[in-house]
Amino acid sequence: MIKSVVDFFGDAEHARPRRWLFYLVLVLIVLADFVVPREHAEYLWERLPGWSAAYGFFSCVLLIFVSKFLGHRAGLMRREDYYD
Amino acid sequence: MTDFVHPAVIFILGALPIPFFTGPVRKAYLVLVPVLAAAAVMAVEPGSYGETQFIGREILIAKVDKLSIVFATVFTMMALIGTVYSLHLRDAGQHMAAFVYVGSALGVVFAGDYLTLYLFWEAMAFASAYLVFARGGEAIRAAFRYLMVHIAGGVVLLGGILLHAAATGSLLFGPVGGAMNMGSYLILAGFLLNAAVPPLNAWLTDAYPEATVTGAVFMSAFTTKAAVYVLARAFPGTELLVWLGTVMALYGVIYAVLENDCRRLLAYHIVSQVGYMVAGIGIGTELAINGATSHAFAHILYKGLLFMGAGAVIYVTGRRKLTELGGLYRAMPLTVALYMIGAFAISAFPFFSGFVSKSMVVAAAGQDHRALVMLALTMASSGTFLHTGLKLPYYMFFGTDRGLQAREPPGNMLVAMGMAAALCIAIGVFPGPLYALLPYPVEFEPYTGVHVTESLGILMFTALGFVIFLRALDPENTISLDTDWFYRKGARAFMWIAERPLARYEKAVSDFSETAALPFLHRSARRGLQLDLQGVDGLVNGVARSILDGGGVLRRLQTGVVTHYALAMIAGLFAAILLFAVVWR
C-alpha cells in the first residue's frame, strides 16, 4: 500500500492525474476558506478569504528569490573547496 | 532523596558497562537504560532534591517542576528512539557518548543551581563532540571547531554565573528578571550560543552534517532544546528574544534554499524552528511559553525523524549531496513515507504534531499584538514546507534518477523512524496529553475551521510556487558562507600571522642573538674576568700586602725592653721641646 502511494508520486506515468489532483486540492482549499466561520478575526488580513493562499505563494516566491539573490549576487554561495 | 532517582545518573552510570557487553545482550542493555530512565522521569514528583552547600553557597542538584518534567519526558523518549536507531552500531564509544550526552542534557533540565547546570552543560559539549569526532577523516576539523566554539561559550557562561553570583549572592537557577546586568547578559550569551541564535549559529550547521549517521540524530534533539529550556527558565519575556527568534526563523529558511548537503539543510531548519521557540520565550505570555515548550517537544521528535530519514539515505548510498541523489523512491518506499511524516509534522500540516505546537506560538504573537512577528513566522513556515517537505524529498527521493544502488535501511532504523512517526501523528491528532504536560493550563483549540484552511492555504500554495519555480530551486554544487567564516578565516589569518610575520621576527631575533649578541657577551665576559684578576685583584692584593709589611715593621719596633722605651720617650721629649721652641720663636 505504502509502495503504491509513493510510486503514485514518483512514476512519470501518473503525472497527469497527479497534476489534476493537485489543482483540485488548491481549488478546494480556497473554496473552503470562503465558507469557514471567522468570528475571532483580529487582524485585517484574517478577514479576507483566500488571503493565506496568496500569502503562502508570495512567501514561497519571495524566499526563493531573496535567497538566490543573496547566494549569487551577494556572494554567499562559494565553491566547495572554498575553505581548503 | 529516596523517592527521586535522577534520570541523568541512570544514563551516565548506565554508559559505563556498555563495552563489557556484546551481541544481543548489549542490544537489550542499550534499550533497557532509556526505558529505566523514562520510568524514573514518570515517577518523579515536583520538588527540590539534593540541597547542599558549596563554597558557602546553596547548591540544588535537582529542582523538579512542570517545565523540567516536560523536557525530561521528551528527552528520554528521544533517547529511546535514538538508541533503537543506532542498535546496529558496534562502536561502544558512540553508544557511551550518546548516553553521557543524554544524561547531561537531563542534568541541565533538572539543575536547580548554576554550578550544577554549568557542569552538565560542559559535559554535554564534550560528549556530543565525540559523536562528530567518531566519524574521523574530514569530520575531525569540524569536530574541533564545534568543541572550540562550545568551550568559548562555556567560558562566557561561567563568567556570567560568577558575576551573577557576586551580584545577587545566590547561585540558584531561576528567572533572572529585573534589571539585566553584565552577569545576566553573559549568561544569556552562553545560552544563545547553544540555542544557535545568529550570529552564534554556525557551529550547528557546520558540525551536525559531519556527525555520524546515528550521532546526528542525538545532536539534533538535545543541545539546542536544552538551551531553549534554560532560556524559558531564566529569560521569559525578554524583548530581545522576540526579535532574535523571528530573525532566526527566517534566517534558517533562507540558507536552506541555498543548501546542497541534505543534513545541513535540515540543520538550517533547526535554526529556523528554534527561532519560533526563542520568539515564544521572548513574548513570555503563558500561551507563548506553552507554545515554545510544546514546539520544542514536537520538534525533537519530528527533527529526529527527519535526521533519521536523511541518515538512512546516507547509510545506504554513502552520499549526502542533493546533486548526487535522486530516484531512490522505488528502492526505499518505507523510508520515503516515514520521512514525509516528519516533513508534514515540521511543516505544521493539520493532524501532524507541528500543527498543534507551532500555531500556539503564532497565536501568542497575535494575542500580544505583534503583527509583524506573526507574519514573519507564517512566512517561515511556508519556507519550512518548501525545503523539508518539497525540495529535500524531491531531490533526494524523486527527481533525476542517478541509478544508485539502494535498499531499505536495517530494520532497527525503520523501527525507530516508525516510533517517531507514530508520535508525530499521535500528538497531532490527540494534542490533549501533550497539552496536559505543559507548564501552564492550556486554553487553546488548534482545530478551528479557519485555522485549518489558513494553514492548508499557506502550505499548498507554497507547493504551487515550488512546482512553478522548480528549476530555480535545483541544488547547486556549492557551500554557503555563514558566520563560521569569521573564525575559520580568522583562524587562518591568525595562523598566517603566527607562521609568517611572527615566526620571521622570532628567527631574526634568534639569528641576531647567535651571530652578534652572544659572541659580544662572551668577549666582554672574558675581558671582565681578566680585568678582575689582573686589575682589581692586583690592587686589592697590593694594598693588603703593604698593610701586612707595615704591620711587620711595627711589630719589630716593639722590643719589650724598658730601656728602649725610655730612650724613645726621651727622644720624643727632645723632639717635642724642639718643635715647641721652633713654633714659639
Image: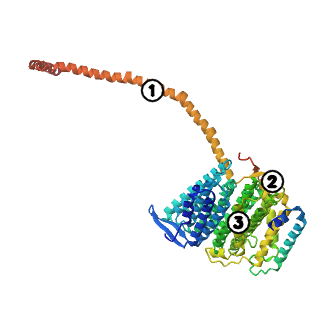
Residue B371 visible from this viewpoint: no
Contact (Cβ within 8 Å) of mark 3 with mark 2: no
Foreground: disc 1 or disc 2: 2
Amino acid at dot 3: Tyr
Q: Residue at position x 62%, y 74% from top?
A: B437
Q: Are marks 3 and 1 on the same chain?
A: yes
Give the percent coordinates (x, y) of residue B321. 76, 53
Between the residue at mark 3 and the residue at mark 2, the CA separation in whole angstroms equals 27 Å
Q: Image quadrant of residue B88? A: bottom right
For residue B525, the mark is 1
Query: Which residue, given by chain and number where applicable, does mark 3 sit on?
Result: B302
Amino acid at dot 1: Ala
Label 1 sits on a secondary structure element that is: helix
Q: Is residue B227 above or below residue B46?
A: above
Foreground: disc 3 or disc 2: 2
Label 2 sits on a secondary structure element that is: loop
Query: Which residue, given by chain and number where applicable, does mark 2 sit on?
Result: B404
Q: Chain of mark 3?
A: B
Q: Residue at position x 58%, y 36% from top?
A: B506
Q: Is residue B401 above or below residue A5?
A: above
Q: Is residue B124 above or below residue B425?
A: above
Q: Chain of mark 2?
A: B
Foreground: disc 3 or disc 1: 3
